[in-house]
Image (cartoon, rainbow, N blue to C red):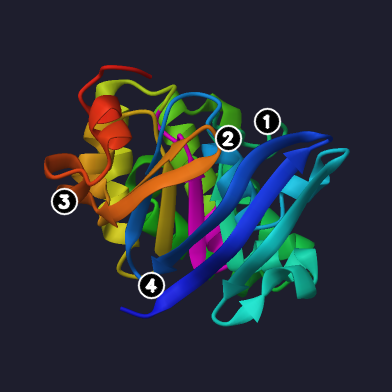
Amino acid sequence: MAAKIEIKGLSAWYGSKKAILDITMDFAEHDVTAIIGPSGCGKSTLIRCLNRMHETIPKARAEGSVRLDGEDIYELPAVSVRRRIGMVFQKANPFPTMSIYDNVAAGLRLNGERNRDTLDAAVLKSLQSAALWDEVKDSLDKSGASLSGGQQQRLCIARALAVEPEVLLMDEPCSALDPIATAKIEDLIFDLKRQYTVVIVTHNMQQAARVADKTAFLYLGKLIEFNATRDLFERPGQELTEKYITGRFG
């Protein structure tokens, strides 16, 4: 399968502290790739480099190559990169003063879209894609903050999908959710890969095993192993990977 994102020799720093070291890997188009590893191993830093969010932190920098469909994202305008590579964060963050409708339409309006029919169609499509439409179709004018935690996270996914990205990054999207809401997000991830390339950071190895086609294991900022998910969990190629997935550390 063709690589949607190619990473070569990627390192990133926060000031003088190196967070990830010389990572090389590819993300295949229409795959779900999970990134696992203990806290502080560089998982979130890695995906923040993929849509140039890392550089928004003072004194943070990155070196190496990240290519999206063959184009180096560090040679493109950051705004256009973030339009093509959307992101959903660990904590649901709907805009609290905006309605459900306006939350989803926010990115389109920011990009200059004003046509109401276009906005209506995009809001409908995005909420359907995020498996939320049936639950909110009669309350689009209510505050996004009035929804449950799981609904808020799906609203944030709908907001990210509204600008029609090619890649969706998800940084521990279920860590604050109950098992039922988590199952809905996991079902959604499975559906989303038909249209998008998905990269998910998770602490939950069972979640990685359920949703991911491939899994990467990071430790102390280094990529230890990257393989088909089933192979990585059932036949790890590195002793460190085996120790982590069997719970001997982490």
Q: Is residue 200 above or below residue 110?
A: above
Q: Is residue 135 above or below residue 164?
A: above
Query: How far is mark 2 from mark 4, CA to CA?
Result: 31 Å
Query: How far is mark 2 from mark 3, CA to CA?
Result: 40 Å
Within 10 angstroms of label 4, few (less than 14), some, or many (20 or more) residues? Answer: many
- Which residue in the structure is indicated by mark 3? 231
Question: What segment carries the magenta color?
Answer: 160-174
Q: Nearer the viewer, residue 223 or 44?
A: 223
Q: Position of residue 78 (x, y in %)?
A: 77, 64
Q: Given this view, does label 3 or label 4 mark the residue nearer the observer?
A: 3
Which amino acid type is marked by label 3? Asp
Q: Given this view, does label 4 or label 1 mark the residue nearer the observer?
A: 4
- Which residue in the structure is indicated by mark 2? 144
Query: Residue sitting at 22 percent across and 50 percent down?
Result: 229
Quick check: marks 2 and 4 in contact, CB under 8 Å?
A: no
- Which residue in the structure is indicated by mark 4? 29
Query: Residue sitting at 42 percent across and 25 percent down?
Result: 175
